[in-house]
Amino acid sequence: MQSILRNPLASPFTLGLSNAAAFGASLGILFFQGGVMIGSATAYATISNPLLVTVLAFVFAMAATSIMILLVRVTDCTPETIILAGLAISSIFSAGLAFLQYIADDVALSGIVFWQFGSLSKVTWGHLCIVAVALILAAVYFFYKRWDYNAMEAGEDIASGLGVNVKATRYLGLIASAALTAIVVSFMGVIGFIGLIGPHIVKRVIGNDNRYVLLGSMIVGAMVLLVAYVIGTYAFYTVIPVGIITSAIGGPLFIFILLRGRRRK
């Protein structure tokens, strides 16, 4: 997304997919028989119909993507405008999510908040198989288009001169990224900053060549997630959801990377 939109702040989360998925999951918990149960042996809410909640989270994440793509096709907007449209979509779904939380009772509210905490404990081996298939398909497509992404980072005119269909590449890249993100978020909840921090760390080390950035981002993102999971599981007297840890360490790390890059200039 950072390559095809030529924006260092582009990620599925800054484009509103996470808030859209959270809104869909909250609808399932609150209205469509995806309610929660509080077990006597645990302090955590258990979603009674996780499949329905997962499906609704995926549907609304893809709906946010469809709205964004429609705006691009109707208005022929620039990559910068796509980012602004994503922020607007994120704000709309955030307002809807706040409204659902406001009208929810205590039990439903606890389920909604717990789902929003990105956590690996929600995932089964069956879910991981689905994520793995989606990841492999998306990765094959991204690697196949790696030269097109390199060309697009040099500018749309240059990419078009090299034979790249810029609009089609941008649309398909957004759809593939959004579909992969929607699947992951619908199973695990919102885990922020992974998709934003990983590429920046790799680019600071090996440059902007997508032949290496794509694979490096996958490896570094996995390492960041693993470290956050270990910290959240073993560093405190209680288990902290990994989404909280990634946000806590991701924000300062992102600021550090930006300041370091500014000093080099």
Image (tube, grey):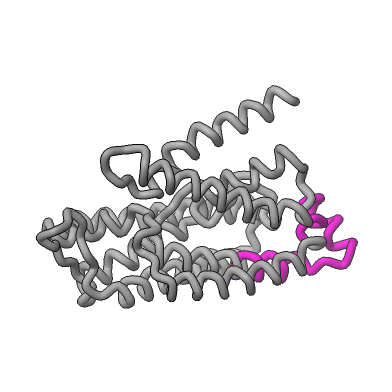
Q: Residue at x 77, y 69 (%)?
A: 144
Tell me where residue 67 appears, x and y as whole percent: 50, 67
42 horizontally vs 155: left or right: left
Q: Is residue 245 visible?
A: yes
228 horizontally vs 37: left or right: right
258 lies above or below 31: above
Q: Residue at x 65, y 63 (%)?
A: 76
Task: Give the quadrant of the C terminus.
Answer: top right
Which residue is nearer to you in this view: 89 or 198?
198
Quarter location, residue 78:
bottom right
164 lies above or below 109: below
Q: Residue at x 62, y 55 (%)?
A: 218
Q: Magenta region: which residues?
A: 149-175
Quarter location, residue 248:
top left
144 horizontally vs 223: left or right: right
Which residue is nearer to you in this view: 31 or 194?
194
117 horizontally vs 110: left or right: right
